[in-house]
Amino acid sequence: MERVPMTVEGAEALRREVERLKREERPRITEAIAEAREHGDLKENAEYHAAREQQSFCEGRIKEIEGKLAAARIINVREIEPTGKVIFGVTVTIINTETEEEKTYRIVGDDEADIKQNRISVNSPIARGLIGKEEGDVVTIDTPGGEVEYEIERVEHI
């Protein structure tokens, strides 16, 4: 089984979701199925079929999350000595050398990526171009808009 990198926060969010599904959603759905059964003929009972579909989705999501957690290699970047090198989990500030625009991203696992929160996947083109480089390095990254040159201003283990 291939290990998938994940931050401590990402793993905790998945654990919270699976607990919520098991403690809240499962009992609610089971209750809905029982209530729908009381209405009689199951072949034409839309409430019953909807509840069974929800149950299937819930159980599938629980299995998916548990699989991701089992395959996760949880990395706590705060426990790694800062060297100025871009690695999984760091927060990196880059400057577009042409426009002087500054951007800050945290490099996270695929499931944690959220561009609105400036979290990019370790498998994204930007992260792949930055991994292994150091503060002060200038890197050229192939983006959908063409090649862009960035200078790595700051690498933080936060």
Image (tube, grey):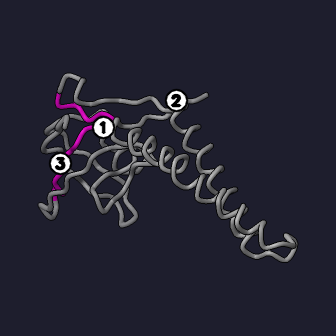
The answer to whether the residues at label 1 and label 3 have Cβ atoms under 8 Å apart is no
Q: Position of residue 28 (x, y in %)?
A: 58, 59
Determine the CA span between mark 2 and mark 3.
27 Å
Q: Secondary structure at mark 2?
A: loop
Identify residue type, mark 1. Gly
Q: Position of residue 141 (x, y in %)?
A: 33, 51
Dot 1 alpha-carbon crowd within 10 angstroms: few under 14, some 14 to 19, many 20 or more? many
Q: Nearer the viewer, mark 2 or mark 3?
A: 2
Dot 2 alpha-carbon crowd within 10 angstroms: few under 14, some 14 to 19, many 20 or more? few
According to the image, label 1 marks what residue?
A: 89
Determine the CA span between mark 1 and mark 3.
13 Å
According to the image, label 3 marks what residue?
A: 93
Residue 3 is labelled as 2
Residue at left 36%, top 67%? Answer: 145
Identify residue type, mark 2. Arg
Magenta highlight on residue 84? yes
The mark nearer the N terminus, 2 or 3, is 2
Residue at left 24%, top 54%? Answer: 149
Residue 43 is labelled as none
Q: Position of residue 83 (x, y in %)?
A: 17, 26
In the displayed structure image, the side of residue 90 where residue 3 appears, left or right: right
Q: Position of residue 20 (x, y in %)?
A: 48, 49
- Say if 25 sits above or below 41 in the image: above
Identify residue type, mark 3. Thr
Q: Give, as a single range, the part of the protein colored magenta.
A: 83-97
Q: Quadrant of residue 90?
A: top left
Q: Nearer the viewer, mark 1 or mark 3?
A: 1
**Is residue 81 or residue 125 the one in the foreground?**
81
In the displayed structure image, the side of residue 81 where residue 125 appears, left or right: right
